[in-house]
Image (tube, helix red, strand yellow):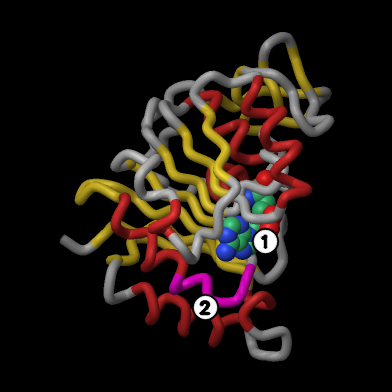
């Protein structure tokens, strides 16, 4: 598995980890211009750390759903092209705006990812859809936002089992979500994100033509 251009494995105080170059944002370790992409704090970081084949090569245009305060999307913007970051909660979005002020290619959108029509006039077609909404209906969010992805694009999603059903067996929740997105996407790879994130499934998929 190759890492995208602009993402490298780097050593920080004896710990080797994926890293990007940019302004530090969440107390992550740094070494010169490199900042650790902490897989414990980021599901996409964990997917890369675990060697999933994300298809990322660097410079992609990205739509990121569930940006929160910008921890992961700050790394994405460090090696990516134009990066649209959707977050509907005003409080984390305030911090996200600060992260975006330090990155000319990062565009925060205070929007609901279940209502793509409210940002369709701003977001151009993208190469990558990253999703980490941790809310009920994760499959539906991925389906609704399929419209932004080009045919050769990739969906990189972190599915949180407990957001769908706190009591259900995570494996059956994952099966249901994968079934749900199956009408719009062909799933290429899945991997549990442990030990970094409990009861999360990393998903790489491509849109069906
Ligand atoms: N991706 C973030 C990171 O790695 O830095 C962490 C995301 S956190 C697990 C999930 C976020 O998704 C929360 O900030 C929540 O407000 C947001 N979210 C949940 N449902 C959403 C929706 N329908 N539209 C936009 N944001 C949503």
- Magenta segment includes 138: yes
Image coordinates of residue 143 in percent, x first then y, are 37, 68
- Quarter-of-image position of residue 173: bottom right
Image coordinates of residue 110 in percent, x first then y, are 60, 47
Q: Which residues, given as a range, are shown in magenta?
A: 135-140
Front-most of residues 33 and 125 = 125
Image coordinates of residue 188 in percent, x first then y, are 33, 61
- For mark 2, give the secondary structure: helix
Tell me how far mark 2 sits from mark 1, CA to CA.
Answer: 14 Å
| Residue under the point 39% across and 54% down | 155
Above or below, 191 against 57 in this view is: below
- For mark 1, give the secondary structure: loop
- Quarter-of-image position of residue 14: top right
- Quarter-of-image position of residue 196: bottom right
Q: Is residue 34 left or right of residue 65?
A: right
Front-most of residues 134 and 110 = 110
Task: Please tell me the numbered disc located at residue 194.
Answer: 1
Of callouts 2 and 1, the N-terminal one = 2
List the single residue furthest toward the left.
209
Q: Is residue 30 left or right of residue 18?
A: right
Please give the residue where the numbered disc 2 appears in the rendered image: 174
| Residue under the point 46% across and 63% down | 115
Q: Is residue 88 left or right of residue 118?
A: right
């Amino acid at each position: 598995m190759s890492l995208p251009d602009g993402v490298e494995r780097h050593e920080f105080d004896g710990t080797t980890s994926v890293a990007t170059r940019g302004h530090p944002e969440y107390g992550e370790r740094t070494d010169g211009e490199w900042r650790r992409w902490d897989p414990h704090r980021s599901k996409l970081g964990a997917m890369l750390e675990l060697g999933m084949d994300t298809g990322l090569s660097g410079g992609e245009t990205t739509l990121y759903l569930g940006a929160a305060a910008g921890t992961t999307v700050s790394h994405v913007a460090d090696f990516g092209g134009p990066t649209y970051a959707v977050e509907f909660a005003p409080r984390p979005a305030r911090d996200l705006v600060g992260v975006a002020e330090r990155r000319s290619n990062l565009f925060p959108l205070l929007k609901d990812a279940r209502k793509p029509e409210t940002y369709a006039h701003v977001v151009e077609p993208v190469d990558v859809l990253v999703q980490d909404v941790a809310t009920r209906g994760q499959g539906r969010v991925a389906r609704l936002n399929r419209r932004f992805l080009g045919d050769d694009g990739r969906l990189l999603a972190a599915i949180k089992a407990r957001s769908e059903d706190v009591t259900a067996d995570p494996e059956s929740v994952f099966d249901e979500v994968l079934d749900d997105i199956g009408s719009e996407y062909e799933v290429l790879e899945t991997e549990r994100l442990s030990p970094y994130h409990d009861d999360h499934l990393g998903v790489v998929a491509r849109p069906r033509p």
